[in-house]
Every structure is written in structure tokens, then in C-alpha cells.
Image: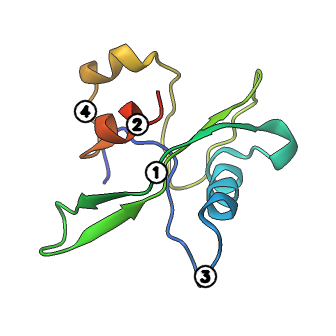
Amino acid sequence: MKGLWAGISGIIEKNEPPLSRAKIEIFEELGLKNNQIKLLKQAKEMKISSPQYENHEWEIYPFLFEADKPKIKLNWENSDYKWINAEEISKYEIVPSLEKVLSNLL
């Protein structure tokens, strides 16, 4: 969803575990390796209606990671990044349901 702020995301391929896919996406989109991140919390799977596809739901597997003083290297999927406090999210144009996903992690 070009032009909107979002969290790191991806699509699970084959039958891979969601946590494995999350770590792959973090590496692909931010350039952070497994030894540079720490899983803090995993929330229960969620179903979110898709605004871009009629009669479609996304299965969301929320994870919260920590990275201590990371050096971010964005890939082609992203144009910018910003660290914010959760309370500030309402100031940004975000992808649908991001606030709901975050609230399950915090």
C-alpha cells in the first residue's frame, strides 16, 4: 500500500512457520540478521478484512521484536523508516488495521 506507513510484513510461503517468515522479512526489508534482533512478544493470529481485495481476509501473525541500535538498510519495498512511540501512530497515515495489530502486541 504505497504511501502509507506500515510494519514489516510478508506472505508465508509453502508451510513455513510464521516466525521464520517474520525473520526473513526483517532481513529482506531492513537488513537485520537474526543475531541483531530479539523476539519480545508474539500475539495471537488475527484475521483482517482486506480493503484492496473484495471478500478477502488476511491472516496476520503479529510479532514484536527489539533491535539495539540497529543500522537499517532499506530494500526496494520501502522508501523511508521512522521509530515512533505507539501513542504517536494516530499522527500517521497507516495501512488499515495496523493500530489493531499493534494494540495486541503492547
Residue designated by label 2 = 104
> Mark 1 or mark 2: which comes first in sequence?
1
Residue 93's disc number: 4
Q: Is residue 4 in sight in this rendering?
A: no
Q: CA distance from mark 1 to mark 4?
A: 25 Å
Secondary structure found at label 2: loop
Q: Position of residue 42 (x, y in %)?
A: 57, 44
Secondary structure found at label 3: loop
In this picture, residue 80 sits left or right of residue 67: left
The correct choice, above or below, for 19 with respect to 55 in the image is: above
Q: CA distance from mark 1 to mark 2?
A: 8 Å
Of tags 1 and 3, which is closer to the observer? Answer: 1
> Mark 1 or mark 4: which comes first in sequence?
1
Nearer the observer, 93 or 105: 105
Q: Position of residue 36 (x, y in %)?
A: 82, 37
Q: Position of residue 68 (x, y in %)?
A: 77, 23
Q: Are marks 2 and 3 in contact (CB under 8 Å)?
A: no
Q: Are marks 1 and 4 in contact (CB under 8 Å)?
A: no
Q: CA distance from mark 4 to mark 2?
A: 19 Å
Amino acid under disc 4: Glu
> Mark 4 or mark 3: which comes first in sequence?
3
Residue designated by label 1 = 44
Of tags 2 and 3, which is closer to the observer? Answer: 2
Residue designated by label 3 = 15
In this picture, residue 41 sits left or right of residue 20: left
Residue at 35% x, 15% y: name it. 88
Of tags 4 and 2, which is closer to the observer? Answer: 2
Amino acid under disc 1: Lys
Q: Are marks 1 and 2 in contact (CB under 8 Å)?
A: yes
Q: Are marks 1 and 3 in contact (CB under 8 Å)?
A: no
